[in-house]
Amino acid sequence: MGNSAGLPPIYADTQIELAPAKIIASFPVNTFLENLAISPDGIIFVTNHEVGEIVRITPDGNQQIHATVEGKVSGLAFTNNGGLVATGWNADSIPVVSLVTSDGTVETLLTLPDAIFLNGITPLSGTQYLTADSYRGAIWLIDIAQRRGSIWLEHPMLARSNSENVTPAANGLKRFGDFLYVSNTEKMLLLRIPIDTGDKPGEPEIFVEQTNIDDFAFDVEGNLYGATHIYNSVVRIASDRTTTIIAQAESGVIGSTAVAFGQGESDVYDGRSCGTAIYVVTNGGMFLPPPTGVVPANVVRLEVGKAGYPLNNS
């Protein structure tokens, strides 16, 4: 993996097992694809961050704008009724959580003027979601039924080491079992937070050090698949904390920002309803351009199930 930008060589000695890769959709240079969510019928919904669009992409790569918010859009997750909940900023640069119906109608759920940079969002339980605040160093609890937001956890391990650094701290987050995993990209940490029976947080702990994870997804066995953004790769971190590089620049993942498991008919493994592929969205290197300059943003399919381990639909 090239490191001409002078980045810390954190993956220099990491094992490489490249998964088969296919670019299924591309966007013009300087498109910042930030996050994605995939429906049970295989439709991929992608956030085009800077222009406030949620794009609908079919498994064969057909694109259309599904919804537009007045501002910017970051994280994306499904609601129980097939809609979407999205984080971002409104036209006045105030952090906002939006609801998007299945037909693309956008409604402001709530504004959070005490938040700074809402980023990844993930279900907690029922109508409750957790969203990372990358600059406040906190995680917000969002209840979409009660239209209410409150701090779930604010902690130094979720914050930046330097408030002048524009790199997000708490960034991607996903629940696996009784833990919430959170990437602190600025500190190059993957954190693990216990969740008690009342869905309250315990004390964060470091799960993996020296790893540059943006957003990520888990398989059923607890293997984590993470986008490394400025490292232009995708890594698999096993439950024993070992890391393997499964996609690099030549796979089409320059500026990888987020990962999700496929859910369509082509993502069935051994006759079971479980994903065999992950989908990766990128920004083409906008944050840290490669030597060749910024390239088109892609949606890339990686065939990870071929290695023989069953995956889930998370």
Image (spheres, rainbow, N blue to C red):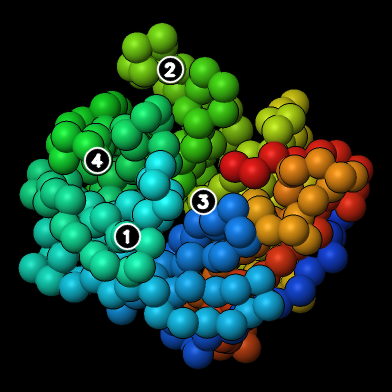
Mark 3, residues whose alpha carbon is within 10 Å: few (<14), some, or many (≥20)? many
Of circles 1 and 4, the one toward us is 1
Question: Which numbered marker is on residue 144?
Answer: 4
Q: Which residue is mark 2?
A: 195
> Mark 2 or mark 4, which has the lower sequence index?
4
Label 1 and label 4: CA atoms lie apart by: 13 Å
Three-letter code, disc 3: Asp
Q: Which residue is mark 3?
A: 215
What secondary structure is marked by label 2? loop
What secondary structure is marked by label 1? loop
In what quadrant of the picture does the C terminus appear? top right
Mark 4, residues whose alpha carbon is within 10 Å: few (<14), some, or many (≥20)? some
Three-letter code, disc 1: Thr
**Residue 84 appears in which quarter of the rendering?**
bottom left
* Placement of 139 over or under 213, stated as above or below: above
Residue 211 visible? The answer is no
Of circles 4 and 3, the one toward us is 4
In x, y percent, where is residue 308? 91, 43
Label 4 and label 3: CA atoms lie apart by: 22 Å
Q: Which residue is mark 1?
A: 101
> Mark 1 or mark 2, which has the lower sequence index?
1
Q: Nearer the viewer, residue 260 or 9?
A: 260
Of circles 2 and 4, the one toward us is 4
